[in-house]
Image: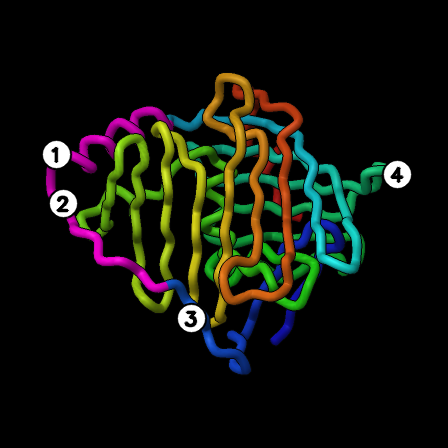
């Protein structure tokens, strides 16, 4: 397995799946699939509330913590173009302001340049992962994290195969299968938790969205933590510092490294 660490960026490419561990996936309760009414109507109300901005620019801080090894952090910016499904992420040293890495997401690939490794070959998005500081304690497909950064919900939540369960103001939507699943949990029509489980590579990741950034659909923070079955106690946290929902998304701003 080859893993590329982009210093404090903490995003990795996994070129070969791990074969030395047994997956510890969650037991999934039986959830009835409902065609109309009840939870489906609630989900439609949630969808109408999640209308992401066509283009936005945000500043954030990302912090990684591993027990016994302290914390590392970086400052970043993200420019996201929802209409054309592309984004640019830049990460800087929090003290010196030096650019650590630049990642352009477009056309189904991640284009990466880092101060440490230079320009890498284009990486297919289905092989691009968010990763923490430790030994694979956090491994979350970037395609799932990308929807959180766009402030949008994945289309699969609204397909007939999605399984819904509602309890008062709480709605759970489960998509996937025993090999790979995503559980989205909404409270008061706002996404609060994403639980990801994978058999290969084995992973259980809990993503928690806290607060709300002013009157937007962006949370104040996104927290990723190794879930059940992991002993790492690893945490990766992104805190939004500003969001401009009227930014420019001109073509030249998404130039490949």
Pointer 4 local density, CA inside 10 Å: few below 14, some 14–19, many at least 20: few
User: In the figure, residue 154 lies in which quadrant?
Assistant: top left
Residue 175, position in %: x, y?
A: 30, 53
Residue at figure coordinates x 58%, y 21% from the top left: 244
Question: Which residue does the numbered mark 3 point to in the structure image?
Answer: 199
Name the front one of labels 4 and 1. Answer: 1
Res. 252 visible in picture: no
Residue at figure coordinates x 57%, y 53% from the top left: 225
Q: Nearer the viewer, residue 38 or 43?
A: 38
Q: Mark 2 near mark 3, Cβ–Cβ under 8 Å?
A: no
**CA separation in Å, label 1 and label 2:** 8 Å
Task: Please tell me which of labels 2 and 4 falls first in the chain.
Answer: 2
**Residue bounds of the magenta highlight:** 27-50
Task: Please tell me which of labels 4 and 1 falls first in the chain.
Answer: 1
Q: Residue furthest bottom?
A: 20
**CA separation in Å, label 4 and label 1:** 55 Å
- Answer above or below: position of 239 versus 146: above
Q: Mark 4 near mark 1, Cβ–Cβ under 8 Å?
A: no
Q: Is residue 189 left or right of residue 123?
A: left
As drawn, the label of residue 96 is 4
Q: Mark 1 near mark 2, Cβ–Cβ under 8 Å?
A: yes
Q: Nearer the viewer, residue 210 or 96?
A: 210
As drawn, the label of residue 156 is none
Question: Which residue does the numbered mark 2 point to in the structure image?
Answer: 34
- Answer above or below: position of 240 versus 8: above
- Answer above or below: position of 78 versus 21: above
User: In the figure, residue 1 lies in which quadrant?
Assistant: bottom right
Res. 240 visible in picture: yes
Task: Please tell me which of labels 2 and 3 falls first in the chain.
Answer: 2
């Amino acid at each position: 397995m080859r893993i590329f660490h982009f210093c404090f960026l903490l995003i990795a490419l996994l070129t070969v799946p791990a074969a030395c561990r047994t997956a510890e996936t969650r037991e999934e309760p039986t959830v009835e699939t409902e065609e109309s009414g009840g939870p489906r109507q609630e989900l439609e109300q949630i969808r109408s509330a999640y209308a992401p901005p066509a283009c936005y620019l945000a500043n954030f801080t990302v912090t990684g913590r591993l027990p016994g090894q302290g914390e590392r952090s970086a400052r970043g910016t993200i420019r996201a173009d929802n209409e054309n499904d592309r984004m640019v992420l830049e990460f800087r040293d929090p003290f010196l302001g030096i650019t650590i890495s630049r990642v352009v997401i477009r056309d189904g690939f991640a284009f990466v340049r880092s101060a440490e490794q230079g320009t890498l070959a284009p990486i297919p998005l289905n092989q691009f992962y968010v990763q923490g500081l430790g030994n694979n304690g956090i491994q979350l497909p970037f395609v799932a994290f990308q929807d959180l950064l766009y402030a949008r919900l994945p289309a699969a939540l609204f397909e007939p195969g999605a399984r819904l369960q509602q309890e008062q103001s709480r709605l759970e939507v489960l998509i996937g299968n025993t090999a790979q699943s995503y559980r989205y949990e909404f409270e008061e029509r706002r996404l609060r938790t994403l639980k990801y489980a994978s058999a290969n590579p084995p992973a259980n990741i809990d993503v928690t969205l806290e607060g709300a950034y002013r009157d937007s659909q962006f949370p104040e923070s996104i927290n990723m933590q190794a879930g059940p079955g992991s002993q790492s106690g690893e945490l990766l946290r992104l805190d939004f510092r500003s969001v401009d929902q009227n930014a420019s998304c001109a073509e030249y701003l998404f130039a490949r490294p």
